[in-house]
Image: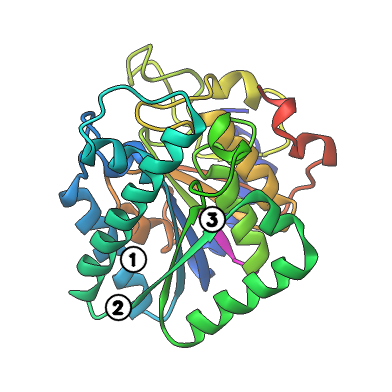
Amino acid sequence: MCDFLENPSVSTAHQEARQRLAAAHRVVVKVGSSTITYPNRALDLGNLERLCRSLANQMNQGREMILVTSGAVAVGMNRLRVTERPRSIREKQAEAAIGQAELINVYSRILAEYGLITGQILLTRGDLENARSLENIRNTFEALIEKGVLPIVNENDTVSTNEVAHLASFGDNDTLSAQVAACVGADALVILSDIEGLHDRDPNIVSEVVAKLIPYANPADPELVSIAGGTTSAQGTGGMVTKLLAARIAANSGIDTVIMHGRRPGDLAAILEGETVGTVFDGQLDVPSHLLSVDEII
């Protein structure tokens, strides 16, 4: 699987996937808590500014961008000077309420410097599973995009219960971003991670020299689950396996997914120019329905 260049047909599929990314017009970008906060859960304003500038740059070129962001609970914890992640749902929801207000305010202020208006959309799993609410959500996205607004999406932790209780919901918004991409008919999904992409072994355990980046993958490949490893990351709840699930959900709607390093948001431009950055999961390959459940990978 890793030696894709040795297989002409796989190499061709990889090139075609990169070409589709270069032609992508509507793109969903997902950023996790560990990318926009420091270990003490304070906002990393430098990286946030670089991310916002990268998004603005793409919109200036005529692309339609949607941002799915995590971080509300982490930011709320920082504001309250809480050092340990609370276990009770009520405490997490209170921290999310505080953190979400801070988070959207920071995004709005930074993006305003680049002439962009932001619109906040908070979702729960039920919103995306109900046909009527799904249509209303889609209409809201379309209205915002038509007005040149950057929609910023987060999970509505303040009213949901299952979503903040355990992993088997949105997984730090990884699967939420894929569902949003499917809802709006996106051409591509780009997930920012704390590593460069999917590797043949965990680069956090072995050296990066030993761990080799996999630039192209079939999201339905059964080997990927064991390669993806754990289910959590430093500040959030979404590890590589939830990103794999997101790629599968996106592929089920014909959407290519890329995992890239979140500390290099400028690489978004390279990806959308068709360059070989990060790992691309081919959205044109069939994914069996039983692989679209989180129960299959945890």
Q: Do the residues labelled 2 and 3 touch (CB within 8 Å)?
A: no
The residue at the point 67 percent across, 58 percent down is: 127
Q: Which of disc 3 and disc 2 is earlier in sequence?
A: 2
Say the numbered circle drawn on residue 189: 3
Residue 197, above or below 123: above
Image position of 79 (left or right of 220): left
Q: Nearer the viewer, residue 246 or 1?
A: 246
Task: Give me the C-alpha separation between circle 2 and circle 3.
Answer: 21 Å
For the N terminus, the quadrant is: top right
Give the magenta part as a residue range.
Answer: 185-189
Q: Which of 55 and 271 is in front in this view?
A: 55
Q: Do the residues labelled 1 and 2 touch (CB within 8 Å)?
A: yes
> What type of secondary structure mainly makes up the magenta span?
loop
Say which quarter of the image contains residue 165.
Answer: top right
Mark 2 element type: loop
Residue at the extreme bottom: 147
Judge the density around disc 3: few (<14), some (14-19), many (≥20) Cα neighbours within 10 Å. Answer: many
Image position of 242 (left or right of 298): left
What amino acid is labelled 3 in the image? Leu
Residue 102, above or below 244: below
Q: Which of disc 1 and disc 3 is earlier in sequence?
A: 1
Residue 297 position, x and y percent, is: 68, 25
User: Can you identify the residue that label 2 sits on?
Assistant: 116
Mark 3 element type: strand
User: Can you identify the residue that label 1 sits on?
Assistant: 55
Q: Is residue 5 visible?
A: no
The answer to if 253 sits in the magenta stretch is: no
What amino acid is labelled 1 in the image? Leu
Q: Do the residues labelled 3 and 1 touch (CB within 8 Å)?
A: no
